[in-house]
Each structure stands twice: as structure tokens, then as C-alpha cells.
Image (cartoon, rainbow, N blue to C red):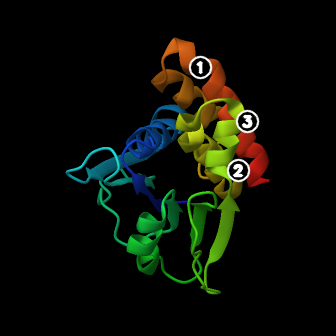
Amino acid sequence: MSRIEVRLAGFGGQGIQLAGIILGRAAALYEGRYAFQTQSIGPEARGGKSRAEVVISDNPRDYPKVRKLDILVTMSQEALDSYINDLPPGKVLIYDKDMIKNPPKRDDIKIYEVPATSTAYNLGNKIVANVVMLGALTKITKIVSEDSIKKAVLDMVKDKYKELNLKALEEGFKLGE
């Protein structure tokens, strides 16, 4: 894996930006790779478009922005509709099936449905749907190790939410199997 490009997208309030930071941290801090993370949020903040992009590379001088998407993770219909055409044939789409009513009809990509929001609800707080998604992403793509993503999650969440987030991550791992 010399370079892999990931876009996480949804709407403001879903923790998309945090998920991107966690993924980049797992790759850079715990796997010794180079990670470049950029983000974009709509002017509405909560409810508006939100996107985080992570480029993971073995090259410290690699271009830091997405050029040819490898993995698209979407947590809203609007995000899926906006970015599905950016995903080249043979690449990976992972989407929150609880939030997507019209899944893509493409047979040239690998598609994974993850019930991230309902899983988070069942854990007691829908706000951890992003971490459920990170668990599934990790298990499906092996982009980082389970141990690295776990450490990065623990680094980034407040103490009172660590246990909940670890449960969300474990559920994500199970869903990604």
C-alpha cells in the first residue's frame, strides 16, 4: 500500500471531521505512515455537507489531496449522491444503510452496507455512528490495524465517552466482517 485515498462524507453533526482525524492519526502515529487530512464543511455547520479526506502514503512528499479516490464512506444520501461519481471502477464504497434510501446501482465497484446509525442507537447514542463506521472501514479495507484505530479513538475522545466509543468500534469491526 503505497498510497490510498479516502473520502468520508455526510452532514454536519455526524462526526465526519473527527473520523477523518482519527483515521489519519491511526495511520501516522501508530503505523508510521504519512497521513494528510483535509476537511470541508458547508456554511450551515450542523445539517450541512461535511467531508473529510485522508491520504495515507509511504512517501513524505506525496501530494496531500485526493486525486483518484480509493474508498468512499458516506453517511447521508446527499453525500452519496454528491460523490459517487468520483469513485472509479474497482474501488470501494461503504455507506450507512440507515441513512441511504437510494443506494447506488453500480456493479463496477465493491459496495458494503453498514447499519452504523441504528447500531449507534442500540449502543445508546447515535453520535458514535462515525466510530461504528471507522470500525467497519478498518475491518473491510485493512487500511490500518484494529489496534491502531482503537488507540487513535482513545486519544481523541473524552474520558467519559471512551467506553462507549470502544463498544462502537467493536460493533463496527463485527459489521465489517
Which corner quadrant of the image does residue 86 belong to? bottom left
Foreground pick, 115 / 144: 115
Which corner quadrant of the image does residue 10 belong to? bottom left
Foreground pick, 91 / 111: 111
Look at mark 2 in the image and give the residue it sits on: 139
Q: Earlier in the sequence, mark 1 or mark 2?
A: 2
- Identified by mark 1, the residue type is Lys
**Above or below, comparing residue 39 to residue 7 in the picture:** above
**Above or below, comparing residue 105 to residue 23 in the picture:** below
Q: What secondary structure is marked by label 3? A: helix
- Identified by mark 3, the residue type is Glu
Q: Earlier in the sequence, mark 3 or mark 2?
A: 2
Look at mark 3 in the image and give the residue it sits on: 170
Residue 106's spot in the image, x, y percent? Answer: 60, 85
Residue 138 visible in the displayed image: no
Foreground pick, 53 / 147: 53
Q: Earlier in the sequence, mark 3 or mark 1?
A: 1
- Identified by mark 2, the residue type is Lys
Q: What secondary structure is marked by label 1? A: helix
Within 10 Å of the Cα at label 2, are there few (<14), some (14-19), or many (20+) other Cα atoms?
some
Q: What secondary structure is marked by label 2? A: helix
